[in-house]
Image (cartoon, rainbow, N blue to C red):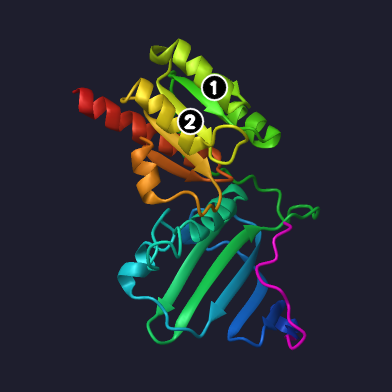
């Protein structure tokens, strides 16, 4: 990973607690970052093995239970209009999940908030036992619909195309949003779903979605985006977008989003 959650000021104080293999950093502004190795908790449904736990906490005002329950929801924010998009923690959640980890938040009003991230440790050490452990893999819903997939980033383009094809969908994948609109305009009834990146040269994901919705109002659209001040709930609704998936997404998350929007269309027809 190349993400450093916070800059380390000159006054930062670090301590190594040898017996617990724990490292702690106090930033000097009320925020404490700690990390240590541990095994995956059995109630998380994660494969057994060594994990790195990173905790980031503050001593701020904390959160009420109703806010805490929605803290990772895309576009949820307690800030006023124009002061926040509610995408920051949703993107963090997507990144952690894509790395095979999990993230939890605990908070108490008046006492602060702590975020705990569990990530699997890469290790070259041989297993301690020869007993084979069979782990039940969650069933990932597949499909056969035709999807127009648009992303100008080569890495995301190739990964997304591979994921969608692997799930059984027929995929028309393009890196140019103008070309995608041209393709959709030529055969609007060919596609069952559009999945588009937001930040692209030419047409943005919002602009592409709005144009396609004008051509065919019932077309379900999923927008994939990182943190962006340009993406607001109002713009999402006006563009005809049915679901927003934070980038980077994993196989489970994109599959769930696809099934969710297609089910809404199916329920509406019935």
Residue shown at 34%/29% (left/top)? 262
Q: Is residue 210 left or right of residue 29?
A: left
Residue shown at 42%/51% (left/top)? 232
The image quarter in which residue 156 lies: top right
Circles 2 and 1 in contact, beta carbons < 8 Å: yes
In terms of secondary structure, what is the magenta stretch mainly?
loop
Question: Which of the two residues, 176 or 100, is positioned nearer the viewer here?
Answer: 176
- Determine whether the residue tagged by mark 1 lies in a helix, strand or loop: helix
In the image, residue 91 lies at what x, y percent? Answer: 53, 54
Is residue 258 depicted above or below 189 in this figure?
Answer: below
Highlighted range, magenta: 1-13
**Quadrant where the C terminus lies?**
top left
Residue shown at 67%/85% (left/top)? 26
In the image, residue 157 lies at what x, y percent? Answer: 64, 31
In the image, residue 84 lies at what x, y percent? Answer: 46, 62
Q: Mark 2 and mark 1: span between their CA atoms?
A: 8 Å
Name the residue beneath numbered marker 1.
180
Residue shown at 28%/32% (left/top)? 264
First in residue order: circle 2 vs circle 1: 1
The image quarter in which residue 15 lies: bottom right
Name the residue beneath numbered marker 2.
208
Q: Is residue 46 left or right of residue 61?
A: right
Is residue 260 depicted above or below 147 in this figure?
Answer: below
Question: Which of the two residues, 148 or 71, is positioned nearer the viewer here?
Answer: 148
Residue that sits furthest to the right in the current view: 124
Can residue 46 be seen by looking at this rendering?
A: no
Is residue 63 depicted above or below 103 in this figure?
Answer: below
Q: Is residue 236 left or right of residue 269?
A: right
Label 1, residues with CA under 10 Å away: few <14, some 14-19, many ≥20: many
Please state the total of marks drawn on the protein image: 2
């Amino acid at each position: 990973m190349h993400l450093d959650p916070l800059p380390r000021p000159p006054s930062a104080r670090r301590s190594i607690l040898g017996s617990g293999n724990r490292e702690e950093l106090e930033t000097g502004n009320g925020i404490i970052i700690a990390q240590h190795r541990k095994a995956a908790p059995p109630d998380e449904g994660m494969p057994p093995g060594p994990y790195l736990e990173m905790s980031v906490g503050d001593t701020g005002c904390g959160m009420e239970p109703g806010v805490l329950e929605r803290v990772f929801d895309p576009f949820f924010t307690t800030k006023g209009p124009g002061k926040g998009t509610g995408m920051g923690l949703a993107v963090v959640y997507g990144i952690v999940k894509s790395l095979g980890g999990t993230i939890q938040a605990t908070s108490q009003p008046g006492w602060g908030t702590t975020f705990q991230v569990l990530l699997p440790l890469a290790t070259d050490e041989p297993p301690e036992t020869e007993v084979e452990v069979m782990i039940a893999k969650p069933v990932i819903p597949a499909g056969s619909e035709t999807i127009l997939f648009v992303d100008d980033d080569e890495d995301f383009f190739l990964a997304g195309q591979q994921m969608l094809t692997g799930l059984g969908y027929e995929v028309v994948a393009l890196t140019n949003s103008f070309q995608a609109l041209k393709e959709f305009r030529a055969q609007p009834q060919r596609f069952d779903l559009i999945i588009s990146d937001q930040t692209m040269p030419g047409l943005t994901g919002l602009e592409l979605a709005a144009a396609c919705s004008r051509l065919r109002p019932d077309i379900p659209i999923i927008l994939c985006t990182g943190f962006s001040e340009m993406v607001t709930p109002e713009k999402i609704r006006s563009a005809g977008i049915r679901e927003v998936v934070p980038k980077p997404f994993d196989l489970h998350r994109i599959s769930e989003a696809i099934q969710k929007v297609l089910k809404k269309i199916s329920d509406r027809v019935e």
